[in-house]
Structure formats: structure tokens, C-alpha cells
Image (tube, rainbow, N blue to C red):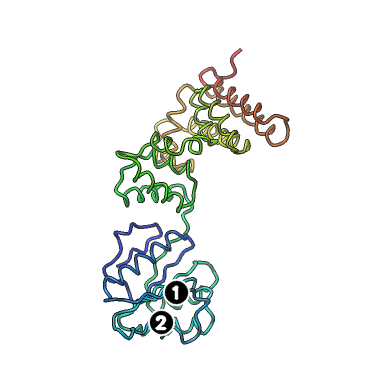
Amino acid sequence: MWHSADMPVPASAAPDAPAPVNVVVGDEELLVERAVTDLVAAARDVLDSADVHDLLAAALTPGELANLVSPSLFGGGCVAVIRSIQDAAKDVSADLTSYVTAPAPDAVLVLTHAGGAKGKGLLDALTRSGATVIRRPKVTRFGERLDFVRQEFRRVGTSARDSGVRALIDAVGNDLRDLAAAVSQLAGDTTGVVDESVVATYYRGKAEATGFTVADQAVEGHLGGALEQLRWALAVGVSPVLITSALAQNVRSLAKVGSAPRGIGGAALASELGMPAWKVDRVRQQLRGWTPGGVAHALRAVAEADAEVKGGGTNAAYALERAVTSVVMARSSGGPQP
């Protein structure tokens, strides 16, 4: 039976025999396309010499569905893929709903629906009539993206540490196609376990020139590294506003985690603060050497830099360098050194 959970599943989870009518629902293009591909492959494994038809619902005319699912003159089964059924004409929608109650033998129908309000009545009717619904919604949460990349590494048979998974997302961004392609490249070009250093080797510049890399270096007290990453980030076009935002988020995280009562476990604190558990663990490590006074000073320094890069100053790069230096100096000392 098809996995109907909201999260992506690997291709190996595909069934031996798909249902006569399947509706893949969602607007995550890569995941929808994979589900369709898996269904078609599974259907062709079951149906001997199956013909495959693939077209948009908007191009389908009333009565044409019956021709699509009819066996060919040479025998064998049929697979019909009809995409974006939310755009189907009214008469075509009626044909689809009627077909589910009496599907053709030796035929598999694969439909896709974007998952929004448009065409929801048709989707509901297909569901009530017995169509198998496979949901592939948009991946929006960072944790879901981490899970996706982990699954991609498993798909290609490559081991990856969590540090490597997070570094790859930082380097490549949120687009699932880009992330899948990056995983394939790393799997093909490297051996052994993929970690943060491997990702940095392949995506140096893009991976390292981010606001959060600058911020991590600063709150950990690495002045030289923070300034180097800052200059590189600005050189490759990272917005100064994004850098101050990253600095502010990191310093605020220090304040939140640092002020929490002692003895609270990582998972419980993560839930209370609305942070991922891995983030709480990382901030706890970064807190070493910080005092409440130092955190307060760092917050003021970042706030001043933020005002300058948003128009209050004339030199954003200088303002950022001063902020990074102030954050590093605030660590351990509780404030600026004389």
C-alpha cells in the first residue's frame, strides 16, 4: 500500500501494484514528480507492455478519458497520467469522478492536484469514490528539510553526519531539487562520510559566506575567522541586513538559553523556547565564556549596527566589522575591553 504520510518517502517504498486510480496531492514539485514516476514504474511492472499517456487536465476534452485508458490494438495495459486536475473542465471532472467507481481493467490512472482550494470539490469527490490519495505537501520546516536531505543521502547509499546535512542546507538553500542534486554530486564525487568539511570543500564561498557563519564565529570568540567570513560574505553579495539579522538571532539565542533554569533537558528547553533541539545544544556550547553582562553588551552592539546598515550610517561594512569586534570582545569580559 502506498505511504500516505505528509513527509517524502524514498523510492524503495513504492508498491508492487498501485491502485487503479491514484491522486498525488501537493505543490512540492520534486516530491510530486517522484511519486508520479514511482507509480508509473510500479504500474509498468505489473501491466504487461503498458502504454503511457501523459497530459495536462486542461488539455483533456470530455469523453477523451475513455480512449486514454483503452487497451492498445497490440494488447497490454495502459497507464494514464493526467496532471493538474484542478484545471480540468467541468465535464472532464465529471468523467474522472465517474471513472473511479468503475475503472477500466488493466489500466492505472495517475492524477495530480496542487492541493489548494481550486478543484477541491473534484478532489473530495475522487476521495469519496475510492481513489488512493498520496499527499506530498510543501516542505516548509527546517526539521523537515533536514529529514529530506538525510533521506536523499540514504537513497544514494552515502552516509552523512548531521553537521554535513546542516552545512549543505546552509550552502545550497531551501529548494529541494537543488538539495537533491547537491547530494547526488557529493555521493558521486566523494568517498566516506559527508561532514561539514566535505561540504565546505565543494561549496566553499557559498557555504561559508553566510550571515550565520559570521555570527557563529563571532559568538564563539573567533575574531579573525569572523572578520574573514564577514569580508567574504560581503564580497559575494550577502546583504548586510542579513548579517546583522544573523548576529542578532545568535546573540538573542544566547540570552534565551543562558537565562533558562538549570537542569532542564535539551528537548524540554527546545519545546519551551521554540527552537530545534540541535540548536539548543549548539547554543549551550557557544555559551561557554559568556556572562549576562557580555550578552547585554553584544545585544546593544548588534542593535546599533542594525540601525546603521538600514540607513542610519554611511558605511555598512565598517558598522558590521565594529559589531563583530564588539561581540567577540564582549565574550568572557562581560563588556568591551579598554
> In this picture, is 221 found above or below 101?
above
Q: Amino acid at mark 2?
A: Leu
Q: In the rendered image, which quarter is residue 162 located in?
A: top left
Disc number placed over residue 64 in the picture, else none: none
319 displayed left or right of 167: right
Residue positioned 42% across, 63% down in the render: 33
Q: Amino acid at mark 1?
A: Ile
The image quadrant where one finds the N terminus is: bottom left
Q: Front-most of 185 and 117?
A: 185
- Residue behind mark 2: 68
Residue positioned 41% across, 85% down in the render: 67
Q: Among all residues in the image, which is located at the extreme front?
A: 74
The image quadrant where one finds the C terminus is: top right
Residue positioned 43% across, 33% down in the render: 282
Q: In the rendered image, which quarter is residue 78 located in?
A: bottom left
Q: Are marks 2 and 1 in contact (CB under 8 Å)?
A: yes
Q: Among all residues in the image, which is located at the extreme top?
A: 338
94 displayed left or right of 303: left
> In this picture, is 313 found above or below 38?
above
Q: Position of residue 35 (x, y in %)?
A: 38, 64
- Residue behind mark 1: 82
Q: Position of residue 144 (x, y in %)?
A: 42, 51
70 displayed left or right of 224: left
Secondary element under disc 2, as helix, strand or loop, is helix
